[in-house]
Image: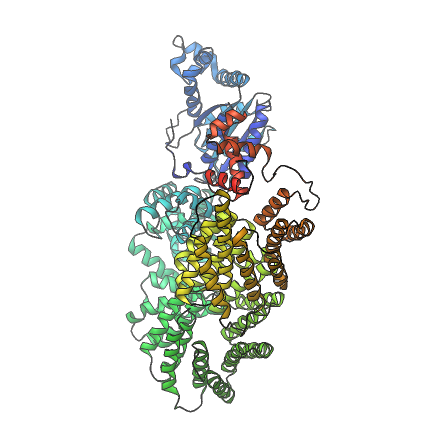
Amino acid sequence: MPTVPRLGSGIPLVARSAEITRLRAALARADQGQAGAVLVSGDAGVGKTRLLTDLAATAEQDGALVLIGRCVGSGAGLPYLPFADVLAQLRGDRPEALHSRPALARLLPDLAVKPLSREDDAELGQLQLFDAVHSLLAELSAERMVLLMVEDVHWADSSSRNLLTFLLSRLSSQRLLVAVTYRADELHRRHPLRPVLAELVRLSAVERLDLTPFNASDATAFVRALADDDLTDVQVQRIAERSEGNAFFAEELLASSVDCGCDDPGVPTALADVLLARIERLSPAAQQVLRAASAGGRRVQYARLHEVAGMAPPELEDALREAVQHNVLVDVNEHYAFRHALLREAIYTDLLPGERVRLHAAYAQLIKTEPGMRGNAAKLAYHSMESHDLPQALAASVQAASEADDAGAPSDALHYTEQALKIWPAVADPESHAGVTEVKLTKMASMFAISAGELERGIAFARQAVRISSDDAKIESLRRLAMAVANLDGREQEAAGVIDEAWELVHDQPESVNRAWVMAVRARMMRAVCRPGARAAAEDALNSAVQTGSRSAEADVLITVAVMDEKDGLVDDACSRLIIARDRAIEAGALNVELRAWFNLGVNRYEQGLIGEAAKVFSEGLRRSEKNGLSWSPSGFQLRALLAVARYVAGDWAGSAEAARLPGDPVANLGTAIVAASGLLTEVGSGRLDQAEVLLQRLRPEWRRDFQLPLFCTAAAVELHGWRGRPDLAVAAAQDGLDALEAMEPGLTGEIRLAALGVSAAADVARRDRRRRDPESSVLDSAARFIELGSVAAKSRPRSGKLGPEGLAWQLRLAAEITRLDDGTGDPQAWRRVVDAFGYGHSYERALARWRLAAALLADDARDEAAQQLRLAAESAERLGAAPLVGALGDLARRSRIQLGDAVPRDTVDLLTPRERSVLSLVALGRTNREVGEELFISEKTVSVHLSRIMAKLGASRRAEAVATAYDRGLLES
């Protein structure tokens, strides 16, 4: 009976390389005359059939005969059903082999030449049937390899189990592999298959393969492959988490999500039916316990379950034992947990409304008798909400938010605070239950949102706090709103207006901590918008903070003064102030001020070219933010992003990738987007171009949110297209990025870098056009605009008052790239200056400059110096793991007959192997994979493998692009 293809059957096998390798190895041994069997176990839906389908495809490609038999769970008890299926497959192809064995008529009655008499039937017996099946498989395997697959033997009848045992115990030198699957979660302690398996695993020809669920990353990869761009990263992540690595669950959740167009569609009906069918086979008492446990969550204590289920201990224990034996519950440290969260969800969803409320109320009552236990406030809030006890839910939600904040979990704290605000209007006298005012609760929500990186939500709550507050509370609310708005790029004027409003309310009041803080934030905003009198305002704020004894406000003002000192060229004074400010903030316990100090101190060191010091500062600041649950606050994520950048510059690319690694969706909020963008240059430099391209596409719509996004993304995109041999796309990317920055913040010093990269891409286009004798393009016009924007940016006044080592190096790089516009190689002296300038600590850019310098020297016939520069560049690139640059250096060295390291110079370009070059040459002539295989006497599949490797080496995504890149780089003869 043919199977209906599942949703996942059309995608490549995901994350099962170890398992399929074992199966293929067993298949290879069987093909050499070493018969074997593999018992594949795993939970329902984990992917056993998909794995064997891949094995069957491999076997058929190798010329094997594949026979498939399936057991069914209908309860019909048909004897020998899987083997009858196998024989039915042979009826058309090998009828003589079947007719020559009369005993097989027991499985296929129409085979008998004449009806069997009762005497004949009794004479044959079961053993003759077994011998007939065994000899049939032996005969078939003598002609060619045989793969016999028997699926779902947990449903097999006793006769089929006996026949399977007979066959496996007689495996020897046949060219036969038997693959058997069964569901591990169906094998309760009294299951009849258990003793059979215990006997089979003792046989030397039998091996066991336990197929476990996907881990988190593999589950995400599976869902992403399954979704085919139909879902967002958030939806993919959510489905992967809910599936807990089960492929079938993931497929059903995905289909349901696509159908309803929502993020959380609940348990799909088809999946719920499958899950509940297992529960309905249990006794009424076991079902009652499972219903009670489902309301308690994924894990429930025995004591709580005893009270809520309302059953006597012996009866409860018998029911729990039954649930455990049938693999519905597992015993974990005096708790009973559902084997899978979706199983619990299906049972819970099936509860009646009144039953659900009653169970939750019972759990809430029990939890109230256990005060002080960690996590109980959150549980009480949940059960109170579900049992409609809103006053109790309000009090518990506020307490749960406080506990989450103490534990450094701002996202959880935000959830409970929002829940409390949601039910606030529905509770009589809410302040008496919550223990806080609505204004205070709203401020808490704003603070938690900002700490969790949800800046826009934090600002929304801050605005609400301003609307509902009065007197001193309104002043503080305005101050916090100004600080929140200031975290968003391009909103400084708005923030300044908000703090001015607070100043109008407080400037006539006597000195107070509240007034000192307003003055501190006002000075910061005056500096940010370049308003006259900012330094005087900062000095007044500092005096006020000292007078009122507010160490936190004092530290905040010291940071503002330090930034102004740095702008005036007093870099060392600024550094000293920042260290003092950091220590004051630590003393005051002002975490956000402390992180602001770490951030500015790191930037101070970075701007001076002290990359090692900067990386240490960013790393320590990030450690402090993570320790206190503020790693995704504005300063927290900025520290993370700049740590990724500093490590990239310093040559610690593994550390850079680690710093830029995200816990979830890269565009979940502004913080994750900036951190994701900060890691792009490491991705591109390492040669992970496909991953970088996907991320660039995800981040492009977010550029408007912060200037750092187009700054990071454009640099990465230009380099990516350059390594792929598409300088025209690199020019377009540079234009896109510079246009975006000019619209946001014209004249940023970061535009010098983008201008240099744009001119570099334009020079590559001009050189390609000259080599191809193409008509004059408009690329030189683009280059002229890049040069103009770079010149304007170089004249702007950066944070430190003048360009630091990095800015000066990019300015020299721009000048050197301009010299390449005429001949494609440029002026060696200009490139020497670039090499020297990046010597401040940028390993990668210095190696890349040496590559350009070597090309310019070779054009001037300075071969010895060019060889020296190539070797130095290759040493750096290999140490960094800069795969594309290593390849480019190797190409240049081979074309120039220069030896790098211990390599032997060759006439041929061996970036590609001889076979790969032969394949690509035929593809360039328009041959299909099949035609290439026929001409080179290799399989079509092998051609496909060679093409995949060729495209990976050339950074190409299509066959035509690989051919074009190979011609451009001199790897194919015209």
Please state the horizontal and vertical placement of residue 232, each as a whole percent of the image. 39, 52
Q: Quadrant of the N terminus?
A: top left
Q: Is residue 372 visible?
A: no
Total count of labels: 0
Between 354 and 377, which is closer to the camera in this rendering? 377
Instruction: Decide which of 713, 385 is in the foreground and name it.
Output: 713
Image quadrant of residue 250?
top left
Q: Position of residue 338 (x, y in %)?
A: 44, 49
Q: Is residue 504 above or below residue 566?
A: below
Percent across and percent down for residue 401 are 42, 68
**Where 313 falls versus 809 (above or below)?**
above
Q: Nearer the viewer, residue 158 or 381?
A: 381
- Quick check: 128 left or right of 385? right
Image: 442 above or below 819 = below
Q: Residue furthest right?
A: 902
Residue sitting nearer the eye, 115 or 955: 955
How was this image coloured? rainbow
Q: Position of residue 598 (x, y in %)?
A: 55, 71
Q: Is residue 234 visible?
A: yes
Is 877 located above or below residue 598 in the figure? above
